[in-house]
Amino acid sequence: MGLLSLNETVESVSASGRNKSRLPVDVLLASSFLAGAYIAFGAFIALVASAGSPWPQGIPGLQKFLYAAVFPVGMIYVIIAGGELFTGNCMFFTVALFRREVRLQDLLRNWFLVWIGNFIGSMAVAYLFGRVGGVLMTEPWMSYVYSLSRGKCSLSFSAAFWRGVGANWMGCLAVWMATKGHSVVDKAIVSHLPVMTFVTLGLENSVANMFTVPACLFAVGSTSQVTWEIFLLKNLLPVTMGNIVGGAFFVGGLYLFISRRKEQAQNAM
């Protein structure tokens, strides 16, 4: 069985947005908790696997590549097992909204509740396993999670925003391509590549950051460069805004536009 066509993919994505808009609050929160936890586990294993790796001097990109190669398992968990992920819903609901299958209030309700659920799920993994379980309470992982978090919190607002745009352009591309596939293997492979791309480039995903920076704060504590206030206002806010633009415009919006224009051109023949 071949991949879904462009129009079939648009229909599937829009139907997903419509179905998600009908979910009750408790289901949304439980599903988004799981999705946040899955993304956190992906970021967690990437952090543990790549920390302190003895790369040759002058080849720092290899450590980033190892981190990025492992990180996508979280997205694969979400796609295969299921869950409500804020970053992916930026695409689903935009397509459904422009096709008039959901209302603006449906979109805002879903995004708000799922963002909260993702945050709780990500922080739960950071606290229960990073802090209480002690995985991040020893070196080299404590220093590495601090280094990652300090870099995220030191970004300017505009840099964090645009890194957020790029990350969810690739993140929603992963979901879009997984939607076109039919088998578990199809979905796992095609969703891995775009996620690996944005992580290698150092782009910013809001849900992953909901794990990484709280994990640092739970393990290391607040410092002059990493605090809850700095994280929420200088990183998570602009990254969330960028993620919305990346998923809504560069994937959902543009593919919907292309689909409609192709249909118009064919009808005009």
Image: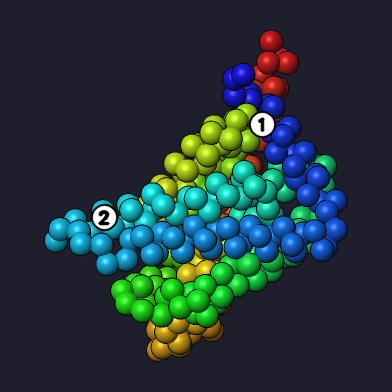
User: What mark, if any, has residue 98 been given in the picture?
Assistant: none
Q: Which residue lies furthest to the left in this view?
A: 57
- Give the answer, above or below, for where 205 lies relative to 20: below
Disc 2 or 1, which lies upstream in sequence? 1
Name the secondary structure under disc 1.
helix
Name the secondary structure under disc 2.
helix
Q: Residue furthest top?
A: 269
User: Residue 105, image x and y in percent?
Assistant: 82, 58
Task: Compute the Cα span from label 2 to label 1.
Answer: 35 Å
Residue ID at (68%, 26%):
7
Q: Residues within 10 Å of mark 1 (few under 14, many from 20)?
A: many
Can residue 80 be seen in this snapshot? yes
User: Residue 68, image x and y in percent?
Assistant: 39, 53
Side (left or right) of 31 relative to 159? right
Q: Which amino acid does label 2 sit on?
A: Gly
Residue ID at (69%, 27%):
8
User: Residue 141, image x and y in percent?
Assistant: 36, 73
Name the residue tied to disc 2: 61
Name the residue tied to disc 1: 9
Can residue 150 be seen in this snapshot? no
Q: Give the image's coloring scheme.
A: rainbow
Q: How many labels does the image show?
A: 2
Residue ID at (44%, 41%):
193
Question: Dividing the picture into quarters, in which one does residue 137 lie?
Answer: bottom left
Q: Which amino acid does label 1 sit on?
A: Thr
The foreground one among 106 and 269 is 106
The foreground one among 11 and 254 is 11
User: Residue 165, image x and y in percent?
Assistant: 51, 55
Residues marked 2 and 1 touching at CB (< 8 Å): no
Residue ID at (26%, 53%):
62
Side (left or right) of 62 relative to 84? left
Side (left or right) of 202 relative to 101? left
